[in-house]
Image (tube, rainbow, N blue to C red):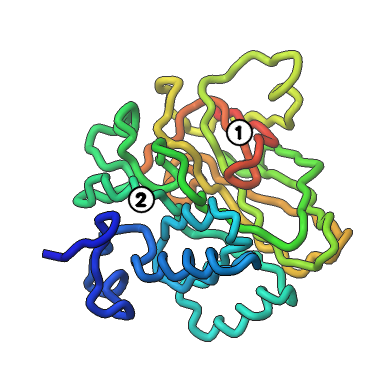
Amino acid sequence: MQRTGRNNEPVEKDPYAPYAEGEKLDRLSLRLPPYQRRLWQALASRTTTPLVVVLVHGGPLDVSDMHGSSRVGAVLTAWYPGQGAATIPSILFGQVSPSGRLPVTWYRESYTKLAMTDMRMMASAGYPGACLPARLCRTYRYWWGPKPLYRFGHGLSYTTFQHSNVSVAAGAAPNTAAAEVTLSNRGGVAADHVLLLFLTYTGAPRAAAAGGAARLPRAAIPGSGCINKTSRSDLVQALAGYQRVAALAPGESRRLRFGLALGGGSSSAWAGFGDPTPPCGEYSLRFGTTKPPVATLELA
């Protein structure tokens, strides 16, 4: 049995032993190993200069204590960088703007209380209805639990990007649509940018209102092959498309186009890991997981 010390944390015989993460090893916690946590906390307590923390790791971490600390000015996740480690100083000294996006959700420590014996996106054979109200599903697509520390697709930059002039229309081919947006660099630093487009099911078609969503660009996709079902879907959101824009100069703008396949089948923007055919109704489009809707699609 593993010994525990302060705050019921594991006691390490060798503080540098790679016990926390590695091949053929299940992690017991999403937090940093105790010695590493105490290291950055000790440094933070002994200096008035904000710390910049570089994390080198293989999986998501709960660094909510860093996130909430006034002593930590920034956190850079490098994963296991390999030859890419040479880029870390360039980012830290401002020679290159970071542009990466998290490929997975970073949950809080409470996530480890879920049963680890079934890690399917929908950990139940009772779909639909498996995720709610129990809220036991996984990944950015089906997670209805507590707000994660960092969402799938999270990432910061040294500049500011703006999305404008969004348009959406039915595609030329059946069961398709096209969305366009103008991406502009409003900051003072040239930078790459990864733009993520998400679909969210919002329910059965609604009558047009005087304002709000009625003012958003809108397109109807008739004969999409969607299925009629209840007005609720377990799906929170789905990544429908992404583009990487390289070296956008300050003040520069580019027009981007996203093609969306919306019917059933493996090529659909809705598909993934056994998802059913998309339900009929309205879908909102958003650029980024925390951004407001920019357009509406209706599948009929």
Identify the amino acid type marked 1: Ser
Classify 211 as above or below 165.
above
Q: Position of residue 98 (x, y in %)?
A: 66, 67
Amino acid type of the residue tagged 2 in the rendering: Glu
Q: What residue did someone put label 1 on?
A: 284
Q: Residues within 10 Å of mark 1 (few under 14, many from 20)?
A: many
The one of 161 and 122 positioned closer to us in this rendering: 161
Residue name at image x 65 percent, y 31 percent: 296
Relative to residue 172, is residue 201 depicted above or below? Answer: above
Q: Measure the C-alpha gap from mark 2 to mark 1.
A: 31 Å
Toward the right, the furthest residue is 251
Q: Specify which label sits upstream in the sequence, 2 or 1.
A: 2
- Specify whether residue 300 is in view: no
Alpha-carbon neighbours of circle 2 within 10 Å: few (<14), some, or many (≥20)?
Answer: some
- Closer mark to the observer between disc 2 and disc 1: 2
Instruction: Report the residue marked by disc 2.
Output: 109
Q: Residue at x 37, y 38 (%)?
A: 276
